[in-house]
Image (cartoon, rainbow, N blue to C red):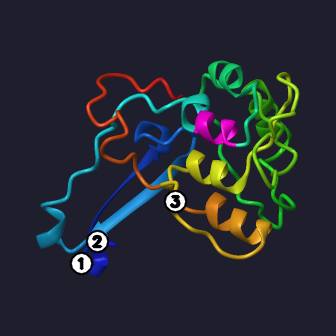
Amino acid sequence: MHDLGYEADWQVLNACEFGVPQLRPRFILVAMRPEVYRNFEWPSAVGAPPTVGEALGDLMAAGGWKGAEAWARQANGVGPTLVGGSRKHGGPDLGPTRAREAWRKLGVDGRGLADAPPAADAPAAHLPRLTLPMAAAIQGFPLDWRFYGRKTAAYRQIGNAFPPPGRKGDGNEDSPGDSGCW
């Protein structure tokens, strides 16, 4: 890059340090012309992200599920990386065995996606699956963001996207200290 006239630097950033309730470390390479690069600063972590329960509690309760509040309290960590339903990993599930087990510990059935949140008549101890809007929320997308195509195509858009940073007003912009998302 230097031979081509660019200043370059790289870091590994984790989405959970920027308000996204998901472990998602990513290698970021930045290369710019020197006159622009001198104004570049790496972003600073915003602190602890919301938990899966905090991010999805309202969405889990949207169908009237009586167990949603208890579910949200026990889903008290960040989620593992969404894999995006890649052809390598199959259809729209929440990842390989290790990731699905981590989702299970958060109270989520990671073997696939649901078409709707749990219904009012679902047992309180139900192990729910995520819907597309829930997966998008885990990625940090605003609730009004739209994805197109059938379930697998839409999930690939969500899971393979680079998570947007936490948004102003999400309560994380002034959070101090260690994010605790490792």
Which circle's residue, 3 or 2, is located before the other in the chain? 2
Image coords of residue 27 (percent x, y): 49, 53
In the drawing, does residue 121 fall left or right of residue 85?
Answer: right
Q: Give the amino acid type for the residue marked by disc 1 in the picture.
A: Gly
The segment highlighted magenta reads 56-62
In the drawing, does residue 17 fall left or right of residue 120?
Answer: left
Residue position marked by numbered label 3 in the rendering: 162
Q: Give the amino acid type for the residue marked by disc 2 in the picture.
A: His
Which circle's residue, 3 or 1, is located before the other in the chain? 1
Residue closer to the observer: 31 or 133: 133
Q: Gap in Å between the C-alphas at discs 3 and 1?
A: 27 Å
Image coords of residue 126 (percent x, y): 86, 29
Residue position marked by numbered label 1 in the rendering: 5
Q: Is residue 59 above or below residue 124?
A: below
Q: Quadrant of the N terminus?
A: bottom left
| Location of residue 55 by image quarter | top right
Residue position marked by numbered label 2 in the rendering: 2
Residue sitting at 65 percent across and 58 percent down?
159
The crowding category of the residue bearing disc 3, from other C-alpha atoms within 10 Å (few below 14, some 14 to 19, many at least 20), is few
| Location of residue 100 by image quarter | top right
Contact between labelled residues 2 and 1, with CB atoms less than 8 Å apart: yes
- SS at mark 1 in the image: loop
